[in-house]
């Protein structure tokens, strides 16, 4: 087989045989990198939203727990003698202005000389809630 001058030049061209990346390889790598970074960004946004919601749940649970501790401290004799519902509106709870708290006392439930006290805390315009329940007995 006879080599032409053109073929010899192509084989010995220093630009052709030098180590490096072609433009197509660089573009493919950039697309892969961009897709990965966009995935990481959306994942980060989801994590931030999840952390924020967890904080809201923790705060609402603490708000309910504080009220429940007050009820338990009062005991059976000092809680309402009839079925009652007490609602503390939004902005009325000093440490939790973004919460609404509702305390429901049901007498003789689940049995005679027992009371069921349920504390429900709402937030985000009542779209979310946390509920704690306890029983008091004579």
Image (cartoon, grey):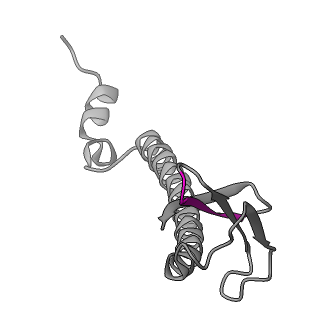
Q: Depth check: give the residue in front, 98 or 41.
A: 98
Q: Name above or below for residue 92 compared with residue 90.
A: below
Quick check: 83 left or right of 78?
right
* Rendering coords of residue 26 (x, y %): 43, 47
- Image quadrant containing the N terminus: top left
Quick check: 104 left or right of 117?
right
**Based on the displayed image, in which of its 4 quarters is residue 107 positioned?**
bottom right
Q: Name above or below for residue 38 compared with residue 82.
A: above
Numbered disc total: 0
Q: Say if the magenta span includes residue 121.
A: yes
Q: Depth check: give the residue in front, 17 or 86.
A: 86
The magenta region covers: 112-123
Q: Name the residue at 51% across, 50% down.
A: 34
* Rendering coords of residue 36 (x, y %): 45, 48
The secondary structure making up most of the magenta span is strand
Residue farthest left in this picture:
1
Q: Name above or below for residue 75 compared with residue 103.
A: below
Quick check: 109 left or right of 104?
left
Q: Name the residue at 58% across, 51% down.
A: 109
Q: Name above or below for residue 126 compared with residue 34.
A: below
């Amino acid at each position: 087989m006879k080599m032409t001058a053109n073929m010899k030049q192509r084989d010995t061209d220093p630009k052709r045989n030098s180590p490096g990346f072609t433009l197509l390889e660089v573009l493919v790598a950039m697309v892969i990198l961009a897709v990965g970074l966009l995935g990481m960004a959306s994942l980060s946004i989801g994590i931030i939203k999840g952390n924020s919601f967890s904080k809201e749940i923790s705060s609402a649970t603490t708000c309910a727990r504080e009220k429940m501790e007050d009820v338990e401290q009062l005991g059976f004799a000092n809680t309402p003698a009839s079925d009652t519902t007490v609602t503390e509106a939004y902005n009325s709870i000093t440490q939790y202005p973004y919460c609404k708290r509702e305390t429901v006392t049901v007498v003789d439930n689940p049995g005679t000389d027992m009371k069921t006290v349920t504390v429900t805390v709402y937030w985000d315009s009542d779209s979310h809630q946390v509920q704690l329940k306890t029983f008091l007995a004579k």
